[in-house]
Image (cartoon, helix red, strand yellow):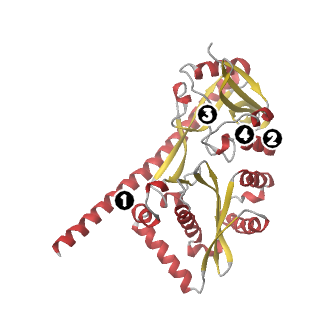
Amino acid sequence: MMYSFSLITLEDLLEIEYASPFPGSQASWIVDWYQTFKKHNDNHFGANKKPYIITAYEGNKLVAVVPLMRLTRIHFKYFKLQFLEFLGQQWSGMGHDIIIIRKLETGFIEELFNWIKSNISYDFLFLKYLPASSRLKSKFRFYRYAGAPFIQISSFSDYETFRINVYSRKFREDLRRTYRKIERDGFAMEVEQHDIDENSLEAMKSISASKTTDGKSDMYENKLKENFHLKIYKQNLSKVVFIKLNGVAVAYGTFIDVRGQRIGVDAAFDRKYRKYSVGIHCVDQIIRIGFEENVRKLSFGLGMDIYKFQFTNSIEEFFMCYDFKIRLKSLLALPYFHYRIKKMNQHVSSVIQKNKQQIKTEAKNKKCSNSKKNVQSVEM
């Protein structure tokens, strides 16, 4: 064997210096997540959580860290299964992968999972929110699992160029139309950017509470989720952008800045002001601010909500992979999980393909429209 593996504590992880492309792979994020949710037991978060932080060495050099967690879920009412997953992928994950510190040889993944199977007891291995570039692809079949729409701000000269090239004509008109309606109804629209403190948090909670009228969940109803998000904001450079009508906050969007990337974390609008599309205007203003502040990339975070695709023509795809130990329980449950994973893969693939096709159609229409303008100009 070329590599040696061992387990360390979460406290040990905080002592290791490394860089990761994903916020959820930061040591502080991992530790905060576990401390917040370790006693929160349900079938989504799991029960009996135990961290397994694996370090990999080549000789005496640390080459990789793999932050895993074992947990228990109940399926089919009484069927207890143990899952081994990335620590934090259960909620608010923004991408996960093996943390690579030094160059890895071809056989690393095989050695790693041979060690895991020999040293950790579990029924199923579920690893989610993996980038297409993950080294895990050399061993496992990847299934499409999620997407993160984003804007590569650095590829546009300014906001106006972006708006003309990315927003559809209908969407641009919707923004103008709803803004005129705001003015006609006697409102003055203001845009404010604030640090996330007690005052801004109270305004955010008030707006978020109106989500329940649409049957959506309000994150701030759950104290643990609220506390974890507050830790995210404290650990990273973070801001909240408000849309105000006559001084009253009616929509907000929060974001964090991580390694040159701006990531949307939470957003909501007051449903009483739905007809003014204040939520859409808020996201548009966040994009404008991104251009003003020379942000390289603006990500809308994981999730393929329809509204996000109005703002961008790019999506980062994320995948999942799975494995299992040959045990009676895992073999009995395997067809069920395989069916669910295949359905998820089909659904996500369908959404991504639909939006890619729409982007191609809009680009073709814009090209035809520009050609017609050039012809008219020559004739004149």
| Camera-side mark, 4 or 1 | 4
Q: Earlier in the sequence, mark 1 or mark 3?
A: 3
34 displayed left or right of 59: right
| Direction from residue 161 to residue 50 in the image, left or right | right
- In the rendered image, residue 134, in percent from the top left (x then y), is placed at 55, 33
Amino acid type, mark 4:
Ala
Name the amino acid type tagged 2: Lys
Residue 236, image x, y percentages: 69, 52
Assess whether mark 3 and mark 1 are in contact (beta carbons under 8 angstroms). no
Check disc 2 and report the residue beneath it: 38
Sort mark 1 into few (<14), some (14-19) or many (20+) by Cα contacts within 10 Å.
Answer: some
Quadrant where the C terminus sits is bottom left
The relative height of residue 164 versus residue 68 in the rendered view (above or below) is below
Check disc 3 and report the residue beneath it. Answer: 337
| Residue tagged 1 | 362
According to the image, label 4 marks what residue? 27
Q: Amino acid at mark 1?
A: Glu
Q: Residues within 10 Å of mark 3 (few under 14, many from 20)?
A: some
| Disc number lying in front (2 or 3) | 2
**Is the residue under label 2 in contact with that under label 4 (CB below 8 Å)?**
no
